[in-house]
């Protein structure tokens, strides 16, 4: 019961935050220097279509009217038409969303699991060789410049060795084959996924490892660990059953707090690997002054961050009985 | 009257050893820091980068062709590998990569430190105010922090540059700073909340000190080390964001940064042919973030006695 | 019958500033069913002693000499696996801070059951649950709260749960490290009463570590007084508290008595952590001792046996005792 109340409260908070971001974005796009009309209306439109769109968006009406129209359009899923593609923004975004979701979730989950696991090992061998190497490796991976790492990965694994494709999500030859079965498509996508996934993984797992390590070292000093030792439990049980579940909690919190930062990395990775996701679309839209697409992608990315935050909250509540009860 | 003077004398005498104590505490911390391998390595790396930034003024003086932005070797108009005249080679229009690299160090320090400084000043003051005053001030400021925290800074700067056109380097610094304070302010707020419970704050309140005086005189000195620690981490993240922005092609076109060098290598299709051009800027960005991070971690160990080796 | 015999136990801590002696030549005995009180101010090494008996000292501490005989085997000679078999099954512990002694992410009953099943792996789950239920009954915690987590318990209940856990494997020795310090007076007396009750019921030996003389006087048969890592007076409760001989014991008791009787000016007990003397062989209380004489500065202190159940580590013991 407590849990439901807690999650409900978080959900409301998240919704409010989302609306605030939406409003800020609205104001930015209307009040930034320059003509807001030029940002909403495709310059290549015929004057008649343009006039129609201006009245549809309420750009000739006062700000609050425009805001109401903005909200109404949002709830009906209408984000306008992309200047660059000439198609509905919503359609483009729905098309890109799964790609981003695959890359983002797999990289976060994989790096969290590996980071927590290795951090546990490092803490257990504190100040020994394995700890030094793991910590050093994590530090270096964590501070590598992501786009550069991505370029190096492409240069080495795709260009020099040729194990993986240079970029993209599907090979053209499979794309063209209309009779290609689902399975071969899946294999091809996975083949394309490995390099960007490895890049994001290398960047992220280090920080989780470092947090888990120091959190584990703190936890091992807790009284209940002494209790567990005094109870005559095996060290392995103490480490995995008594220390790790407590030590993992700060890691989960830090995952939630770093989600926004991870999205930055996601956008960069997508751009370098030409992975057709929302982050790359945002970068493209900004380069091409495709304002409706930029606005919608940003909003969606904010929504993704908030939603993942909520999922992490659920996970946290599941892991920590002090919140569950 | 007499007792009063003797009291104040005693007070003055008390002050002396206290001050000495403070200095020795600082010395002790410095000693622990120096013992720390990670901290030492970080400091050495940082001084190398500082040296690079200082040296960046020299190449253009030798020959205008070494100017990182406008200097072009008249004999070379494409990217060639290292040679006697160009120790690290040249870029696609014949500019010297080494002098670009040195100029990049200057930009990295400038962006990193100024942006981190602004965000730390913001974060520390907002954290102290929220923590000290509590109630609705706290609620408003912390909700604001929540909102900013879920916005990916890089993408926010991207949106800004799409709205306001090409951003110059100081605008970039400012925007990064404005979006990177919430993490600091949360930590400072938590610290302020615990400090508020301490008797000396209560005593200062009873003595009639104004809130501003309490914050400045009693709380700030106690949270400042923590702010300084966070500043080293913020320097790293500011450098990374600026580099990423430049890499995507939204940097300040009037200055050469490492991110921009990477963008040129990438966009001009030299990444497979010119490792001498691809490697240095990336290594520099990674190493400078690493060294700030290492200094930060070492400071963390100094400030947090729980992590010290002796209470294993 | 002697259950535990500690002989010349010495422990040092390695710190940044060098080695610090935490325990120096501690020797005492504890019989089955008896309670031995260990009194001394904070930092005198009481808790280190408790941890040393379980061989749970932190990594930077080491036992440099001595023997720990428990049921006629030397605990210090056992392998890690063997000592693990002894922990909790034979010697269990009630911890100083019950709030933190329970793991916040596991149910209380599970934590108690874990102690039972670890040392009796053939036990069926059902009978382990039965045993746990009995333990909850014993310490008066309602059974419906078995499935709850530590944060749902009140402070006193947590303390009782910790006691139930200590009793789980029917140990022959319990080390109680300030079990009541964090509790209010009413809870404290309840807990002490129940500890006394279990001791009678189960014929437990208890090593009771406390800085509170009143509590120790209430519950213990024998008393050890510690100062700066050394044992300085050891004997039956009536002797040590009724007719203290060592100047430190006297100061300790008088400062306690002034609290309840007032009148006499308080004699502050000096902080033992700063009182390290240049010559470690001399009496550790030398610098603060009101009775010290020239002989104290020239000779090592010795154990003086004033009665079969009363020993004092002081050169002047006879002199003080007799007049």
Image (cartoon, helix red, strand yellow):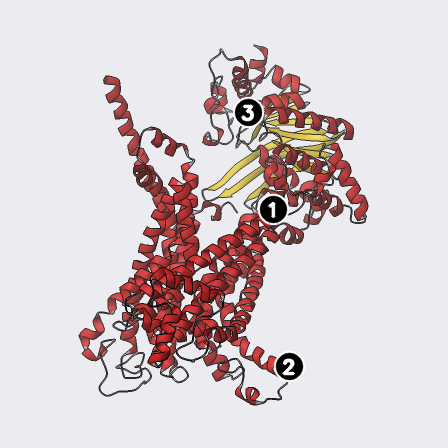
- Cα distance between the residues tagged 2 and 1: 45 Å
Q: Chain of mark 2?
A: A
Residue marked by disc 1:
A2
Q: Which mark is residue C218?
A: none
Instruction: Mark 2 and mark 1 in contact? Answer it, CB < 8 Å.
Output: no
Judge by depth and name the residue closer to the eye, C323 or C119: C119
Instruction: Mark 3 and mark 2 in contact? Answer it, CB < 8 Å.
Output: no
The reply to whether label 3 and label 1 mark residues of one chain is no
Is B16 drawn above or below residue B177 in the view shown?
Answer: above
Judge by depth and name the residue closer to the eye, B243 or B280: B243
Quadrant placement of the N terminus of chain C: top right
Q: Earlier in the sequence, mark 2 or mark 1?
A: 1
Q: Position of residue B25 (x, y in %)?
A: 36, 42
Q: Position of residue A287 (x, y in %)?
A: 36, 75
Q: Position of residue B9 (x, y in %)?
A: 25, 25
Q: Quadrant of residue C321?
A: top right
**Which callout, 3 or 2, points to the residue nearer the camera?**
2
**SS category of the residue bearing label 2:** helix
Query: What residue lies at 27% left-to-right and 82% top-to-bottom?
Result: B84
**SS category of the residue bearing label 3:** loop
**Which callout, 3 or 1, points to the residue nearer the camera?**
1
Instruction: From the viewer's perspective, tell me whether residue A226 is left or right of residue C295.
Output: right
Is C267 drawn above or below residue C9 in the view shown?
Answer: above
- Residue density around tag 1, few if under 14, some if 14–19, many if 20 or more, within 10 Å: few
Q: Chain of mark 1?
A: A
- Cα distance between the residues tagged 3 and 1: 63 Å
**SS category of the residue bearing label 1:** helix
Residue marked by disc 2:
A183
Q: Position of residue C259 (x, y in %)?
A: 52, 17
Residue marked by disc 3:
C301
- Cα distance between the residues tagged 3 and 2: 86 Å
């Amino acid at each position: 019961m407590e849990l439901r109340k807690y999650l409900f409260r978080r959900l409301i908070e998240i919704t409010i935050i989302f609306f605030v971001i939406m409003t800020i974005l609205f104001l930015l796009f209307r009040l930034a220097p320059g003509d807001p009309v030029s940002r909403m209306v495709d310059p290549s439109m015929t004057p008649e279509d343009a006039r129609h769109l201006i009245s549809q968006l309420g750009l000739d009406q006062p700000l609050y009217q425009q805001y109401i129209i903005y909200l109404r359009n949002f709830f009906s899923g209408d984000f306008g038409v992309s200047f660059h593609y000439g198609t509905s923004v919503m359609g483009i975004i729905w098309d890109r969303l799964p790609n981003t979701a695959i890359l983002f979730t797999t990289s976060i989950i994989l790096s969290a699991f590996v980071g927590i696991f290795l951090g546990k090992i490092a803490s257990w061998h504190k100040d020994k060789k394995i700890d030094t190497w793991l910590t050093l490796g994590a530090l270096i991976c964590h501070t590598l410049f992501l786009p550069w790492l991505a370029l190096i990965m492409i240069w080495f694994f795709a260009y020099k060795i040729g194990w993986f494709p240079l970029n993209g999500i599907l090979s053209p030859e499979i794309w063209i084959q209309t009779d290609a079965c689902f399975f071969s498509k899946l294999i091809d996508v996975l083949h394309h996924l490995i390099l960007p996934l490895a890049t994001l993984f290398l960047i992220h797992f280090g920080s989780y490892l470092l947090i888990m390590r120091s959190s584990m070292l703190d936890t091992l000093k807790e009284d209940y660990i002494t209790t567990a030792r005094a109870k005559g439990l095996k060290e392995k049980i103490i480490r995995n059953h008594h220390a790790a579940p407590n030590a993992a909690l700060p890691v989960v919190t830090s995952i939630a707090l770093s989600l926004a930062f991870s999205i930055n990395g996601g956008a960069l990775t997508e751009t370098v690997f030409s992975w057709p996701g929302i982050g790359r679309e945002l970068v493209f839209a900004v380069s091409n002054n495709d304002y409706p697409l930029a606005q919608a992608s940003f909003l969606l990315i904010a929504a993704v961050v908030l939603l993942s935050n909520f999922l992490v909250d659920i996970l946290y509540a599941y892991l920590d009985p002090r919140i569950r009860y | 009257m007499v007792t009063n003077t003797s009291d104040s004398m005693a007070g003055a005498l008390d002050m002396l050893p206290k001050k000495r104590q403070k200095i020795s505490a600082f010395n002790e911390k410095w000693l622990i820091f120096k013992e720390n391998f990670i901290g030492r390595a970080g400091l050495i790396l940082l001084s190398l980068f500082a040296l690079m930034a200082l040296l960046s003024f020299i190449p253009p003086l030798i020959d205008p062709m070494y100017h990182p932005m406008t200097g072009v070797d008249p004999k070379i108009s494409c990217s060639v590998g290292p040679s006697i005249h160009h120790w690290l080679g040249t870029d696609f229009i014949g500019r010297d990569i080494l002098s670009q690299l040195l100029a990049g160090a200057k930009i990295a320090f400038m962006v990193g430190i100024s942006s981190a400084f602004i965000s730390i000043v913001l974060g520390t003051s907002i954290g102290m105010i929220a923590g000290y005053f509590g109630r609705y001030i706290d609620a408003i400021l912390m909700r604001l922090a929540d909102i900013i925290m879920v916005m990916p800074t890089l993408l926010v700067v991207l949106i800004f540059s799409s709205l306001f056109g090409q951003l110059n380097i100081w605008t970039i610094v400012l925007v990064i700073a404005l979006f990177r304070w919430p993490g600091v302010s949360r930590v400072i707020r938590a610290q302020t909340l615990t400090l508020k419970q301490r008797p000396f704050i209560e005593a200062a309140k009873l003595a009639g000190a104004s809130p501003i005086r309490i914050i400045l005189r009693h709380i700030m000195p106690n949270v400042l080390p923590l702010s300084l620690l966070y500043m080293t981490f913020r320097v790293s993240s500011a450098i990374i964001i600026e580099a990423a922005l430049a890499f995507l092609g939204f940097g300040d076109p009037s200055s050469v940064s490492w991110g921009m060098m990477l963008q040129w290598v990438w966009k001009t299709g030299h990444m497979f042919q010119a490792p001498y051009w691809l490697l240095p800027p990336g290594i520099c960005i990674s190493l400078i973030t690493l060294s700030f991070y290492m200094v930060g971690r070492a400071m963390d160990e100094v400030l947090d006695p729980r992590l010290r080796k002796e209470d294993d | 019958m002697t259950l535990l015999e500690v002989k010349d136990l010495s422990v040092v801590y390695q710190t940044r500033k060098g080695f610090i002696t935490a325990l120096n030549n501690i020797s005492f005995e504890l019989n089955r069913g008896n309670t031995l009180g260990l009194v001394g101010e904070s930092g005198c090494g009481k808790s280190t002693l408790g941890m040393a008996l379980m061989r749970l000292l932190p990594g930077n501490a080491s036992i440099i000499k001595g023997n720990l005989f428990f049921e006629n085997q030397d605990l210090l000679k056992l392998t890690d696996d063997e000592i693990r078999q002894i922990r909790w099954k034979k010697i269990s512990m009630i911890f100083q801070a019950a709030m933190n002694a329970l793991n916040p992410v596991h149910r209380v009953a599970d934590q108690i059951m874990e102690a039972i099943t670890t040392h009796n792996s053939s036990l069926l789950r059902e009978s382990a649950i039965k045993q746990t239920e009995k333990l909850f009954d014993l310490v008066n915690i309602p059974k419906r709260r078995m499935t709850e987590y530590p944060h749902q318990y009140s402070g006193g209940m947590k303390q009782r749960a910790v006691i139930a856990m200590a009793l789980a494997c029917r140990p022959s020795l319990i080390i109680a490290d300030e079990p009541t310090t964090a509790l209010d007076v009413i809870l404290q007396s309840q807990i002490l009463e129940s500890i006394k009750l279990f001791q009678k019921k189960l014929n437990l030996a208890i090593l009771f570590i406390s800085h509170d003389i009143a509590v120790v006087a209430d519950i213990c048969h024998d008393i050890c007084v510690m100062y700066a890592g050394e044992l300085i007076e050891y004997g039956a409760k009536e002797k040590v508290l009724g007719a203290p001989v060592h100047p430190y014991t006297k100061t300790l008791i008088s400062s306690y008595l002034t609290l309840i009787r007032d009148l006499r000016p308080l004699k502050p007990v000096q902080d033992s952590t700063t009182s390290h003397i240049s010559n470690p062989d001399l009496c550790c209380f030398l610098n603060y001792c009101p009775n010290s004489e020239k002989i104290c500065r020239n000779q090592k202190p010795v154990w003086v046996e004033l009665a079969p159940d009363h020993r004092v580590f002081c050169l002047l013991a006879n002199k003080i005792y007799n007049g």
